[in-house]
Image (cartoon, rainbow, N blue to C red):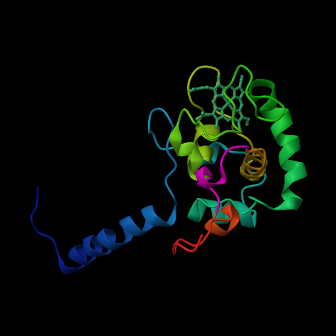
Amino acid sequence: MSHKTNKSGYAAIAIAAVLLPLAAIAETAFQHTITGEKLDLSKAPDEGRDTAAVKHFLETGINQYNGDEKALPKGEQIYLAACSGCHGQKAEGKMGPGLNDSYWTYPKNKTDKGLFETIYGGAQGMMGPQVLPLDDTLLLMAWIRHLYQGPPEEAEWLTPEQRGAAPTDGAG
Ligand code: HEC
């Protein structure tokens, strides 16, 4: 191995050292719920990849369809077609667990990033990967959140305002 590294070689290494971590931050890494392996989002259909909501979600892990009345009917339709057979009409649980209460087998499903990972990558047994158009996945996730019956304070996916949380200055 040669130790002859010229100036531009060092510059390239320095640039790579700066850019590689940035690339990792720019694209949120999604991980399989059971194995922790990185999920390959390129398996999702081309359709519905470049909506504003998908772009925002891939950058931030935040689902802008949450609480969006206009998104709910479509989310319901997709949920009924893809999920209700196992999870119940109202996500109350059937052969698959309920998704409308505050108990989660995988606690990360309290975050939208975690919920997306469980849906896209699957979990165990009958919960295989549910690879739908990415926008459809966000829509049905908003519907699942809409069906939630548990205590608002455990709804981690909501912003404090959406949770109706009292200010934490002791006034409540
Ligand atoms: C063929 C039946 C089946 C279908 C269809 C199915 N699921 Fe599941 N799902 C399951 C089973 C069984 C489990 C439990 C797996 C486990 O514990 O690892 C599960 C687990 C889950 C969990 C984890 C719940 C927790 O408590 O942490 C989520 C979230 C979930 N499913 C969402 C969905 C969504 C959304 C869809 C539709 C896109 C869907 N599933 C379609 C059977 C199914």
Q: Is residue 163 magenta?
A: no
Horizontal arrangement in the rendering, residue 18 relative to residue 2 (left or right) = right
Judge by depth and name the residue closer to the eye, 160 or 144: 160
* Residue 53 location, quadrant: bottom right
Residue 137: percent from the left, percent from the top?
A: 73, 47
Horizontal arrangement in the rendering, residue 44 relative to residue 90 (left or right) = left
Note whether residue 82 is visible.
Answer: yes
- Quarter the C terminus occupies: bottom right
Image region (quadrant) for ligand 1: top right
Note whether residue 40 is visible.
Answer: no
Count of numbered badges drawn on the protein: 0
Judge by depth and name the residue closer to the eye, 105 or 84: 105
In the rendered view, would you say 102 is above or below 85? below
Horizontal arrangement in the rendering, residue 114 relative to residue 23 (left or right) = right
Horizontal arrangement in the rendering, residue 148 relative to residue 127 (left or right) = right
Residue 129: percent from the left, percent from the top?
A: 64, 32
- Secondary structure mostly seen in the magenta stretch: loop
Residue 38: percent from the left, percent from the top?
A: 47, 44
Q: Which residues are magenta?
A: 149-158
In the rendered view, would you say 148 is above or below 60? above
